[in-house]
Structure formats: structure tokens, C-alpha cells
Image (cartoon, rainbow, N blue to C red):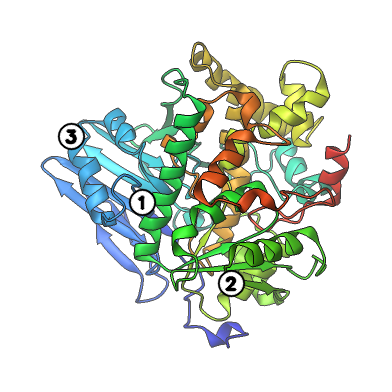
Amino acid sequence: MPAAPEDFRPGWLRFRRQYVIGPRPFALTPDWHIEPLWDGRLLSAHPDLERNVYRTGDRQIVVLGTVFDPETPDASQAEIVARALESASGPQALVAATYRWVGRWALLAKWPDAEIGLTDPCGLRQINFALEPGVLWLGSSPEIVRQVNPSELDGTSDKVSFYSEDRFRELESPWLGAETIYSGCRHLAANHWLDTRTARMVRFFPDRPVRSVPVADAVERATVILQSTLAAAAKRYPLQLPVTGGWDSRILLAASRPFAGTDRIRYFVDRMGVCPPDHADVRVPQALSQRLGFALTVENSLAPPAWFEAQLRENVTLSRTLPKTNAIYTKLLPGETRMNVNGNVSEICRCFYQQRMGKLWGEPTVTRMLRVMGFAGSQFAGRALEQWLEGLGPQMAGTGLDVLDMLYWEQRMGNWGAQYPAEQDIAVEELSPFNGRDIIMTLLGTPAVLRQGPGYPVYAQMAERMWPGIMEEPVNPPEGSIDSAGRVISEAWRRWLAY
């Protein structure tokens, strides 16, 4: 079993599952994929990154990452991409065509009069971009963009202060806004496309009212999307699902029922060196496995060595060393080939910030949002949220969307939510089945009171519909929990939740 960098192929871990697009090739090893696109653009991609290039008439597209279409679970990714481009006469039509997509992907598409970059709904696979004179570079991380377009750390004092503070690290380094720590490098924000001809981000959502959906219809629609997404994924990859005591873990376990007991899925819970054997997030999965009859492996992942942490820092901007970093290292050692299934994104629909904002007795002003996010008094965070609200506000009227749902969607998931999948790229590919615009909008169309704790009625109905009896074990017992991403809640965050 590999335990040192020399045990791996030379250069294989560097920027694993990453890409860069620009006028010159970038290849760390002979295995890197170099492909001409159009107008002098070249795609350079690590060999483990899924990619599809399709051309039809005067339209062209490159999709990087994984895409599933729950409406056609038997379709290959190439077929899904081709169908979307053939129906897309322009940028807005392409966005509409991707409403059905679930996965973690980024794309570049070209028509005679337009070229755009676009990401999955939460930007879990990012597009970072920077300009050299007259040339636009696109890449999966600021670190890889710096390799082709060198840039210096942005020394703006409020920004440096923001990411240097202890609370930033204690809260797992949740970035805000579309800037990065480097001068001249930005990342494409969720619900925007990048106009590559002007290097300008264009907001395309929200663009319509949220359609009210009867609960029974929403439950049926959402469960079909989740089950079909896992069916589509299981046809291409063997899967692994972490099972804890949380809500999103329970929903995904229920959706996986057709594959339980087959070699297409493996269930596990990882103590990550910090969770005691009798913790609820170990006891509840064990009770579920006994009640429902699926095999569960209890793991306790290893602390990574210094070389691994150094490699993560080179690959991912502001990478972290957390208990869940142990899990990444442990997945790397045996050469894990299973796709990891993760419950993130669901929190957008579970009124995450509304329930915490209730402690603040008032409207969600920037000051109050900063407080609920843990960044009260931060100049940089305040500036980022003010700019975000300025761009979002004009499009919120009449949509029926809650600004706090959008805060979680675009700022929390679009930044913090994208960090762990990027860190995991060194070891495994990840799928968040809730990361599809169709399922998000379906659930947001139900009454908010039915998507809130402690009972989360819509979610309880979804789980029980997919796997009867699954709700007979408690969800999130009160002693504390590890969420579906395997995150041990920090003591600082616990103190805030107890406020």
C-alpha cells in the first residue's frame, strides 16, 4: 500500500482531476491530455478528469467533470452533452438544457456570436479565471491558473486579515465572494455564466418565480430524481456512501436501496480519529444496518503525513487539515476507484440559515448575515456580502425565493461547499445528488415550514417513501453529529449554535 510520494507515479498527484484552458499547453507528465478547442484555445487536463468535447454545426462545447441526467439514466455522458448542445441556440438555452443535469461539472461553450463558461448549480467544480494581456486563462483552481499566468498574493489588508484569523480556520475556511487570494484571479460565482469575451460574470438566476409544488408531488419528483441519479451513477462507477446520523445521509441511504447488497455500492462510517466508537454517528448507522439489512464498515482513518498535506496545499488554495483530511488520505492509499456520494447542497432546501437567523430577531441585513455566518465585524466579509446583495437584489423581486436560501446556495455552497470536493480530487471523484437545479427548485417550491427542523416533514416523507422503515431510527440524536461530508463540527461553531 502506498505511503510516500515516491510510491505513486511521478507527478500523478499534482493537480489530479484538474484542468486549464488557454493559448498554451500545460502538461506536468506525458499522461496529461492536450486537445485543441477553437480560436487558438487549448484544453490541458489531468488524465483522471472526465471530459467531453462536442461540435455540431457552428456550436462547440467542452464539458469537464461528471454529468448525469436523471430523466435518461441509461444515457452516456457524451449523449447527454450532445443533446444539450443540439437544443441550445445560445447561452440562456444552454442553461435551460442543464436544469436536468446533476453532478459536478464545468463547461466552455461557443456559438458564432458568444462564448461562455458555466458550472454546475453550486459551482462545486469551479472555473477560476485570470487575464494576461489580451488572453483569458480558465482553470479548476487558482493554483493551476497561477502556473500559466503567474500572479502575486493580493495584499489588500482586509482580505489578508479575513483569511488569517483563527475564526476563519475554526469555521473550516469558508470563503466569501468571487475574489481569490491572488491579484487578478477570480472564480465564477454560482448562478452566473462567464462572458469570456469581456471576462465579465453575468447573473442568469433567479430568472423566474419559484413554482409552488404540492408536497406529495414534490416528494415524488425529488425521490425519482435522487434514485435515478444514483442509478445513472452506478451504471458508470461503483459507489461508496458514508452513513451517519444526519438527515442528508438518511435520504441518500434511502435512495440507494435498489443497490443495497450489490457490489455497486459500499456503505461506511469513518470515525476519522476523533469520533468515539459509541458516538451517535456510529451507533445510528450500525442500528440502521441491522434493521434494514445492509453491510456497513466502520473505519477510523489515518492522519496524513506532512508530504500529503503539502501536496494538498499545492493543489488547492487554502486547503485545510481537518479530521476529514484523514479520510481523503485513507481513500488515496488503496487507490480507491469508487465514486464518493455526498449529501451537501441539500441544506439549501432545509432552511439552514433561517433557523439560525431566528436567533437574531430581525430582517437578514448584512450585519446579521455576517453574524449568523460567524464573521461579525469582518470588513472583507461585509464588503463581499454587500457586493453580492447589490447584484442579487434586483432579480429577487417576485421570485418567491428567500434571500437566506440564496445566501446558503451562492456563498456557503459556492465557496465552502466547493472546497472539500476540490481537496478530495487527489483521491476520489465525488457526487452530490442534490446538486441539480431541478431538484433544488422542486424542494424550494414546498412550504418552508415543512422543510425545517426538528422534524423536516418533507425529508422524512422522502426517506420513508424510498425505504420503508428507515425513519424508525433517530436522526441527529442530541449529543452532536458529523454531517454527511464527514465534518466534525468545530467547538467554535458549537458555541455559536448554542447562542
The answer to whether 427 is drawn above or below residue 251 in the figure is below
Give the residue pinned by disc 1: 68
Q: What crowding class fits label 2: few (fewer than 14 Cα within 10 Å), some (14-19), or many (20 or more)? A: some
The amino acid beneath tag 2 is: Ala
The residue drawn where x is 37% and y is 69% is: 47
Of labels 3 and 1, earlier in sequence is: 1
User: CA separation, marks 3 and 1?
Assistant: 28 Å
**Looking at this rendering, what residue extends furthest in the top direction?**
398
Q: Position of residue 384 (x, y in %)?
A: 64, 30
The image's mark for residue 112 is 3
Of labels 2 and 3, earlier in sequence is: 3
**Is residue 441 visible in the rendered structure shown here?**
no
Secondary structure found at label 2? loop
Of residues 499 and 20, the one nearer the viewer is 499
Give the residue pinned by disc 2: 295
Q: What crowding class fits label 1: few (fewer than 14 Cα within 10 Å), some (14-19), or many (20 or more)? A: many
Q: In this rendering, would 133 be left or right of 492?
A: left
The residue drawn where x is 34% and y is 34% is: 95
The amino acid beneath tag 3 is: Pro
Q: Quadrant of the C terminus?
A: top right
The residue drawn where x is 70% and y is 39% is: 159
The amino acid beneath tag 1 is: Phe
Q: What crowding class fits label 3: few (fewer than 14 Cα within 10 Å), some (14-19), or many (20 or more)? A: few
Secondary structure found at label 1? strand
**Is residue 487 visible in the rendered structure shown here?**
yes
Q: Position of residue 105 (x, y in %)?
A: 41, 50
Secondary structure found at label 3? loop
Of labels 2 and 1, earlier in sequence is: 1
User: CA separation, marks 2 and 3?
Assistant: 53 Å
